[in-house]
Image (cartoon, rainbow, N blue to C red):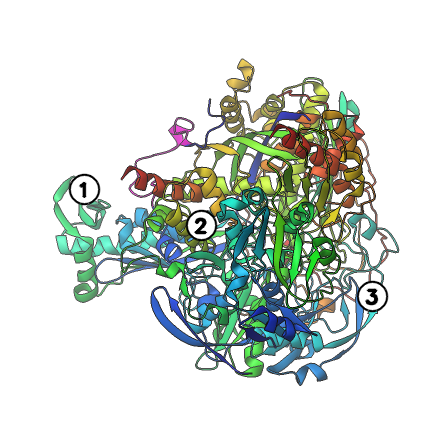
């Protein structure tokens, strides 16, 4: 047994028939290409590029969760020693953005430097550029902002109630709008209510995933400088070079040909370095001063202003048969995306595609909400869209095991998805390996499994009836939202804004790999679709006047 | 005082890559006149090993030794477009792009060699040691350096290749959620052992027995780095970390590493890792992406282990001593189960 | 704002540069002397990425006022190698995959070197204690501990 | 911007420190504030070597205010303080942080001062400041009246002093709470008991309730339980990112009892 040891082994005997292990370089424990640079301290992180005359940028931030900005008085700060320039929202060419606009997903909802309103504690309203960091810090203290404090909301379920303070003007009901149509993303597969009614046990749970800081050892930042020929160079710690370049190009209204981004050696990211907050402002600083500008978060900013992995709240209800088969699973999920969308709306799409976890369950139902609250916007982190719900699912699986009196490992193997099974997002499973992972972990820990489950395989037992779409799927119009159009471009009121020149526009592609015949159309002859009330059901009145053009995945595709 | 032992189990799968808006990566590969190759990317190495894994993939595909390949990333003037290093997409997407680029470069290299050897390029193979020879006749060979020199100075060929890998945009049905989220999944299962102090609520993670299925382990050293470090992070998420300790209230948010707690080197459990390799059909040499999913099973496994130890279910992360202690009090004392 | 001339011994060589008032040693080493091996991780003394030795003792260079290092012997990760020959710890970190992003690595190596200089054959517990002021977010520490122990073991058996 | 004044003697520094200046010792507290732009515009420091000396006279050991925690750990005659110094900061912090500075480190720092409080240390002030009980200096630490020159620490009888620090992170973490107990006994009842806490109030403080319970008693199981029962009496511990006031109160008695058990069996 391997308990109490720190081993590492490749279990080559498992799935051996699916691999050719005789390759020259693949499979070798080759040293990292970058390792000598790391151990000598020579690996060039973005801040390891020295510039003469480097200026330092720091932001003036909101002390309030939610407030209107009445006036920003920079006069005193401008006279402080070393201050070169103070930047406010007026200086930003395109002062409203959403990160995924480069993928045509979501409305522009976040100012670079807020001019009218702040929606979280720490939101920037101005940036000071000074000769030294200490001088920038001192001048930040001298910027006077008149605030009108507004009521705020911090809990996801409170935020969805009628009358809650409206956090984000693009989504006044505090929920992201999916497909121009619903205030949540739906997953409907089979007939949940009927299956729950027929189950031997109903197991319920509520789970709360905490907000988490990515905490890379290198904080987020960028250095910009003038290059030749009217170009700007930007050294950056981004996790996504062209994402950041595209964002800078959009926000600064500069063609990508005038931007030269250099990065690639990054002191940890874990998802927190996708947001492209620093690059546009550093470059803008250089444009306004003609000098190299560094914009770097200190650790305190990294922890409280830097976007965390957002909190998630999940409610799960399972219908379980006495023998441990899970026949129904319902999710209601709330992603706390903070004040602005960033990447949260996408994480939910990814998360919904992941439900109900690695199990074959014939009836699955999910309503997942992307909720705006007056806290630091959330963003990606290792396992984005999945970690929180996996915590919920696997904690819940133990409750189910206890309810039916089963060994928790056996419950997983019994319900595990296998090759050929139909998944709730209506694609056939292949290349599965959950059963084998369960078996190996149990074997090492000395957890005894029944002979049946020891003999189980991901390659057998799936498909057949398990590979069929449900005969009937109950659908509904719950959470219908009016006033948002499922148009193709993520701009308010159809206003034209330049498409990012930096991101190559993906061409429409042929349909994805062969999928089973589409189902999900309302049933012809069966019981009327049940209409379970979701936990929150915002008003169906038009959310706002005027045409809203909204991009969704499907909208984009039809463009 | 009593310290109770408990064990917890969790199993997960994890989608590799993203599909929103289409998910492309590009790569360029070219040879110097001495047959050494440069791979130009705009992908990011933030510690996960992007430079190293693409280097191995390029060397394998080109048929040259690893020392003959250098990966240069990320400069937007030279590295072609890539979505970025997130969503466990790096190895899978960029690896495939590097294979395509390397295949194109390799084909030119073999044509150049074929012209020098006066044979058909289709009859040539590489030995992975810097030589190209006629299949079945190792003596009829030319070095990759000689082939590259001939291509550059004599034949006027560019030994270079372009690669792109694109997972097309997936439509998402608003009413049912039907979609093609990803093409492959990684898997994991593990058993965690903890001890719980029933007077203080303190939880110690003692041991982890894990099984991770990662597709082909392209470099076991890199895979182990991810799994070991990722499990540590998962354990940290489970029982230490949060930016908002009194969520949803925003009070007492940590602003330094003394208050943002993570397990220290004195908190480490033993962790025995087993790697399973079921190659992904469309993965580069079957590779998936171990980097993100490795943390995930730790969160529920720790929660389940605490329940096993003292009968307290913590449904709100992180599992702080305070929550455990409150749970024990609410139950009228520890209720050890030791059911696993 | 008057600049302050600071002369110190940096990795065995006497160096001089100007410091700003209030500037910390980390910034002085990086901007003033161009030694980029110590890293900024927090500026609060809580991460150890900026670790250097001063007169043989590990210090957090972000918490050292640059001018107070005048006349002292400051060593950084950039000075670990002797010419082209790497320190055995550097080799061990490479061999044991003890670095991922590499950002904590220079500070970690300085702490490890200081440990082995005063205790060539430390126990695991002593290694853990020696690196407890250096945070790593990638590795989970175990490969770092193993790398350091491997050097200690080599010395012991040599 | 920060201006630094360096003096060759502590007395000169004490005269200069006056209004609006911070005293810079090991840097672990003040330099963090400098980096964050929150420090005073003037910093005063001294290079007086006398501040780094450790001298023993009879049963009293005097630590210069500038003695580092690493120096404490390296000195065999301070063995009773080794368990305290070892759990403060990481190695770098111990190489920099001073015993004088620790008296002024805000919550959750200052665990060395907790030990000094239990030990009944006396603080030598610079210049004509005289010698003050450590209680007084800790009480006035938000508005210190002068600079600390040295700390007189009475050596406790073997087995009469115990220290415990509870952290979330091992081996280096800040305090959930720390406890120091001085419980002299001649094989009989305890006399002159002093019990101090860290992180159980705004700064290091003594527990009158626990001291009352222990004073004049033998350190047996029943006494330990009685002490544990009143461990948090009258205290209003802070809530921070690591623990709530509720948690600190709930576990103070547990950790106190465990410390007393260890002391009995030591």
Q: Which mark is residue C82?
A: none
Q: Which residue is mark 1?
A: B135
Q: How much space separates mark 3 and mark 2, taking CA atoms?
A: 52 Å
Write down the region rendered in magenta: A9-30
Q: Nearer the viewer, mark 3 or mark 2?
A: 2
Label 2 crowding class (10 Å Cα cut-off): few <14, some 14-19, many 20+?
A: many
Our reading of the magenta stretch's main secondary structure is loop
From the top left corner, tell me how far across and down residue A321 is, in percent: 71, 20
Viewer-nearest residue: B286 or D38: D38
Per the image, the residue denoted by label 2 is C100
- Tell me the chain of label 3: A
Q: Is residue B94 above or below residue A476?
A: below
Give percent across and percent down for residue B74: 43, 62
Q: Nearer the viewer, residue A121 or D225?
A: D225
Structural distance between the alpha carbons of marks 1 and 2: 40 Å
Q: Is residue A444 magenta?
A: no
Position of the C terminus of chain A by quadrant: bottom right
Chain of the residue displaying label 2: C
From the viewer's side, name the closer residue of D127 and B152: D127
Q: Secondary structure at mark 2?
A: loop
The reply to whether label 1 and label 3 mark residues of one chain is: no
Q: Is residue B163 left or right of residue A205?
A: left
Residue under label 3, please give it.
A545
Which residue is at 43% across, 38% downward? Answer: C123
């Amino acid at each position: 047994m391997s308990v109490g040891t720190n081993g590492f082994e490749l279990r080559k005997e498992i799935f051996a028939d699916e691999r050719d292990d005789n390759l020259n370089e693949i499979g070798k424990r080759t040293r990292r290409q970058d390792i000598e640079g790391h151990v000598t301290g020579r690996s060039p992180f973005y801040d390891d590029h020295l510039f003469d005359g480097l200026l330092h940028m720091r932001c003036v931030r909101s002390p309030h969760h939610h407030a209107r900005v009445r006036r920003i008085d920079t006069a005193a700060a401008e006279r402080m020693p070393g201050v070169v320039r103070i930047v406010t929202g007026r200086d930003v060419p395109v002062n409203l953005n959403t990160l995924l606009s480069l993928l045509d997903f979501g409305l522009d909802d976040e100012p670079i430097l807020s001019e009218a309103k702040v929606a979280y504690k720490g939101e920037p309203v101005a940036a000071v550029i000074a000769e030294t960091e200490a001088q920038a810090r001192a001048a930040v203290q001298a910027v006077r902002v008149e605030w009108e404090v507004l009521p705020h909301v911090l809990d996801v379920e409170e935020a969805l109630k009628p009358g809650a303070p409206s956090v984000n003007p693009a989504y006044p009901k505090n929920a992201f709008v999916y497909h121009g149509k619903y205030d949540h993303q739906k997953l409907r597969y089979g007939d949940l209510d009927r299956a729950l009614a027929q189950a031997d046990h109903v197991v319920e749970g509520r789970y709360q995933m905490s907000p988490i800081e990515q905490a890379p050892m290198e904080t987020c930042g960028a250095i910009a400088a003038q290059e030749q020929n009217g170009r700007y160079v930007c050294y950056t710690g981004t996790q996504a070079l062209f994402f950041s370049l595209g964002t800078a190009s959009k926000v600064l209204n500069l063609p990508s040909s005038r931007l030269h981004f250099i990065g690639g050696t990054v002191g940890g990211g874990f998802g927190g370095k996708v947001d492209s907050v620093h690059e546009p402002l550093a470059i803008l600083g250089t444009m306004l001063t003609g000098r190299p500008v560094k914009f770097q978060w200190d650790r305190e900013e990294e922890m409280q202003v830097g976007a965390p992995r957002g909190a998630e709240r999940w409610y799960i209800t399972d219908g379980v048969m006495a023998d441990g088969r899970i026949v129904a699973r319902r999710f209601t999920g709330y992603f706390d995306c903070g004040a602005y969308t960033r990447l949260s709306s996408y994480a939910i799409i990814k998360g919904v595609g992941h439900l109900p976890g690695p199990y074959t369950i014939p009836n699955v139902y999910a309503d997942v909400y992307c909720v705006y609250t007056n806290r630091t916007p959330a963003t990606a982190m290792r396992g984005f869209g999945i970690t929180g719900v996996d915590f919920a699912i696997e904690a819940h699986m133990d409750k189910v095991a206890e309810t039916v009196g089963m060994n928790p490992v056996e419950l997983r193997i019994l319900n595990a998805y296998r090759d050929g099974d139909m998944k709730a997002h209506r694609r056939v499973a292949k290349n599965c390996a959950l059963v084998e992972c369960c078996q190996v972990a149990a074997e090492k820990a000395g957890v005894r499994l029944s002979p049946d489950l020891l003999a189980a395989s991901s390659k057998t037992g799936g498909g057949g009836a398990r590979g069929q779409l449900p005969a009937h799927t109950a659908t509904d119009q719950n959470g219908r939202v009016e006033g948002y159009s499922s148009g193709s471009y993520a701009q308010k009121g159809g206003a034209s804004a330049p498409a990012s020149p930096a991101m190559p526009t993906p061409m429409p592609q042929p349909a994805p790999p062969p999928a089973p015949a589409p189902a999900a159309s309302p049933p012809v002859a069966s019981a009327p679709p049940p209409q379970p009330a979701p936990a929150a059901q915002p008003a169906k009145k038009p959310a706002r006047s005027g045409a809203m053009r909204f991009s969704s995945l499907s909208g984009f595709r039809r463009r | 005082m009593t310290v109770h032992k408990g064990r917890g189990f969790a199993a997960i799968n994890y989608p590799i890559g993203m599909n929103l808006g289409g998910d492309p990566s590009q790569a360029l590969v070219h040879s110097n006149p001495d047959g050494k190759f440069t791979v130009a990317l705009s992908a990011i190495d933030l510690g996960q090993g992007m430079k190293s894994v693409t280097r191995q993939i390029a060397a394998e595909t080109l048929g040259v030794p690893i020392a003959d390949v250098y990966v240069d990333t990320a400069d937007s003037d030279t590295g072609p477009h890539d979505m970025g290093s997130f969503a466990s997409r790096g190895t899978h997407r960029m690896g495939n792009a590097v294979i395509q680029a390397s295949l194109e470069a390799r084909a030119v290299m073999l044509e150049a060699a074929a012209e020098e050897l006066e044979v058909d390029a289709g009859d040539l193979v590489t030995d992975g040691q810097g030589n190209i020879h006629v299949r079945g006749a190792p003596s009829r060979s030319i070095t990759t350096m000689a082939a590259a020199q001939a291509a550059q100075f004599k034949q006027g060929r560019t030994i270079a290749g372009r690669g792109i890998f694109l997972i097309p945009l997936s439509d998402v049905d608003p009413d049912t959620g039907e979609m093609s989220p990803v093409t492959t999944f990684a898997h994991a299962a593990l058993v965690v052992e903890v001890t719980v102090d029933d007077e203080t609520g303190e939880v110690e993670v003692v041991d982890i027995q894990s099984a991770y299925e990662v597709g082909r382990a392209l470099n076991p050293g890199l895979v182990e780095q991810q799994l070991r470090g990722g499990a540590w992070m998962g354990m940290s998420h489970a029982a230490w970390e949060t930016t908002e300790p009194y969520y949803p209230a925003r009070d007492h948010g940590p602003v330094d590493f003394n208050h943002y707690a993570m397990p220290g080197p004195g908190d480490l459990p033993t962790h025995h890792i087993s790697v399973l390799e079921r190659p992904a059909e469309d993965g580069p040499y079957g590779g998936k992406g171990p980097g993100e999913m490795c943390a995930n099973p730790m969160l529920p496994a720790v929660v389940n282990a605490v329940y096993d130890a003292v009968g307290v279910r913590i449904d709100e992360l992180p599992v702080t001593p305070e929550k455990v202690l409150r749970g024990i009090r609410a139950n009228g004392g520890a209720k050890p189960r030791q059911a696993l | 704002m008057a600049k302050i001339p600071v002369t110190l011994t940096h990795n065995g060589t006497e160096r001089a540069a100007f410091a700003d008032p209030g500037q910390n040693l980390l910034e002085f080493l990086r901007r003033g002397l161009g030694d980029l091996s110590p890293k900024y991780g927090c500026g609060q003394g809580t991460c150890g990425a900026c670790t250097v030795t001063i007169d043989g003792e590990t210090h957090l260079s972000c918490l050292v006022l640059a001018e107070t290092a005048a006349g002292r012997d400051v060593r950084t990760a950039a000075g670990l190698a002797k010419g082209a020959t790497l320190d055995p710890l550097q080799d061990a970190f490479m061999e044991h995959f003890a670095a991922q992003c590499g950002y904590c690595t220079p500070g970690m190596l300085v702490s490890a070197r200081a440990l082995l200089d005063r205790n060539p054959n430390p126990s695991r517990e002593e290694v853990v204690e020696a690196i407890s002021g250096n945070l790593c977010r990638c590795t989970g520490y175990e490969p770092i501990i193993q790398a350091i122990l491997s050097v200690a073991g080599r010395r012991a058996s040599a | 911007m920060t201006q630094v004044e360096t003096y060759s003697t502590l007395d000169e520094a004490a005269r200069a420190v006056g209004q609006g200046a911070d005293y810079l010792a090991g840097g672990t507290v003040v330099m963090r504030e400098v980096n964050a732009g929150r420090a005073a515009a003037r910093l005063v420091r001294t290079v007086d070597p006398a501040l780094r000396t450790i001298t023993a006279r009879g049963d009293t050991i005097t630590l210069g205010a500038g003695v580092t925690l690493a120096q404490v750990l390296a000195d065999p005659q301070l063995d009773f303080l080794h368990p305290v110094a070892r759990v403060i900061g990481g190695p770098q912090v111990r190489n920099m942080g001073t015993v004088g500075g620790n008296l002024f480190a805000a919550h959750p720092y200052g665990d060395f001062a907790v030990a000094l409080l239990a030990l009944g240390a006396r603080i030598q002030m610079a210049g004509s400041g005289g010698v003050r009980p450590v209680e007084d200096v800790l009480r006035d630490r938000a508005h210190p009246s002068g600079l600390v020159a040295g700390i007189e620490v009475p050596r406790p009888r073997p087995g009469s002093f115990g220290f415990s620090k509870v952290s979330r992170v091992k081996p280096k973490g800040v305090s959930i709470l720390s406890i120091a107990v001085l419980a002299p006994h001649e094989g009989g009842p305890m006399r002159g008991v002093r019990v101090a806490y860290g992180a159980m109030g705004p700064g290091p403080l003594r527990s009158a309730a626990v001291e009352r319970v222990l004073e004049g008693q033998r350190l047996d199981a029943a006494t330990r339980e009685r002490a544990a029962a009143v461990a948090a009496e009258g205290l209003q511990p802070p809530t921070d990112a690591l623990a709530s006031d509720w948690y600190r109160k709930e576990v103070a008695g547990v950790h106190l009892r465990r410390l007393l058990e260890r002391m009995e069996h030591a």
